[in-house]
């Protein structure tokens, strides 16, 4: 009889526990050190923030995909820098690829340089902390283009269309 009561309590507690998606539970950063780790980190099984702390060149197109949350808000960031104690950029790095497609909503590229063209399909794309794009930025639709923001000291060498 006791075992049935314990089993019943366990089943009820499992049914009452809130469902949490995998993206809600991933809170640690993905650190990319080569092409394979970068491609994996940028995919839907990565984390909300991808940290690149060295110059990195890849020979394939990159896709930033998946919806992630940081502190309850939809966000995705590729950080191409190391930070000082006050979280300001200390050293900046360059990512080179033929193409980067942004499919994650509210994605940010922060404090480094991307060499290649960027194709934006999701809304809320931003460039921050003096980011440089050595290439063009193409938007798939007006909603993506109208929601784009660029912070202070951002440089885009190519066209925006």
Image (cartoon, rainbow, N blue to C red):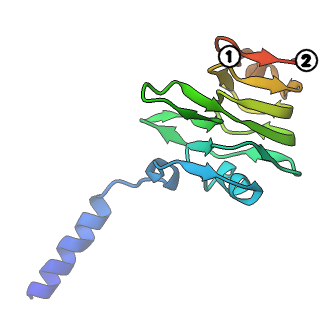
Mark 2 closeness class: few <14, some 14–19, many ≥20 residues within 10 Å: few
Front position in the image: 82 or 27: 82
Q: Which secondary structure lies at badge 1?
A: strand
Front position in the image: 6 or 157: 157
Q: Which image quadrant is residue 82 in?
A: top right
Q: Residue at x 80, y 19 (%)?
A: 142
Q: How far across and how far down the image is residue 76, in percent? A: 59, 37
Q: Residue at x 69, y 27 (%)?
A: 123
Q: Note whether residue 120 is visible.
A: no
Front position in the image: 95 or 99: 95
Q: Residue at x 68, y 16 (%)?
A: 149
Q: Is residue 57 left or right of residue 105?
A: right
Q: How far across and how far down the image is residue 33, in percent? A: 67, 53
Q: Which image quadrant is residue 119 in?
A: top right
Q: Is residue 9 left or right of residue 136?
A: left
Measured in 3D between alpha carbons, the distance from the residue under mark 2 to the one under mark 1, in whole angstroms, is 15 Å
Q: Earlier in the sequence, mark 2 or mark 1?
A: 1
Q: In which quadrant is the C terminus drawn?
A: top right
Q: Which secondary structure lies at badge 2?
A: loop
Q: How far across and how far down the image is residue 22, in percent? A: 50, 55
Q: Can you identify the residue that label 1 sits on?
A: 149
Q: Can you identify the residue that label 2 sits on?
A: 159
């Amino acid at each position: 009889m006791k075992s049935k009561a314990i089993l019943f309590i366990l089943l009820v507690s499992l049914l009452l526990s809130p469902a949490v998606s995998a993206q809600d539970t991933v809170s640690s950063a993905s650190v990319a050190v080569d092409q394979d780790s970068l491609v994996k980190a940028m995919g839907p099984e990565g984390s909300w923030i991808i940290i690149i702390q060295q110059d990195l060149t890849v020979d394939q197109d990159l896709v930033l995909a998946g919806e992630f949350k940081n502190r309850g808000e939809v966000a995705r960031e590729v950080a191409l820098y190391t930070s000082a104690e006050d979280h300001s950029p200390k050293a900046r790095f360059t990512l080179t690829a033929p193409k980067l497609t942004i499919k994650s909503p509210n994605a940010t590229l922060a404090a480094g340089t991307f060499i290649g063209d960027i194709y934006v399909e999701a809304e809320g794309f931003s460039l921050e902390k003096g980011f440089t794009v050595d290439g063009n930025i193409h938007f798939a639709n007006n909603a993506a283009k109208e929601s784009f923001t660029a912070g202070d000291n951002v440089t885009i060498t190519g066209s925006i269309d």
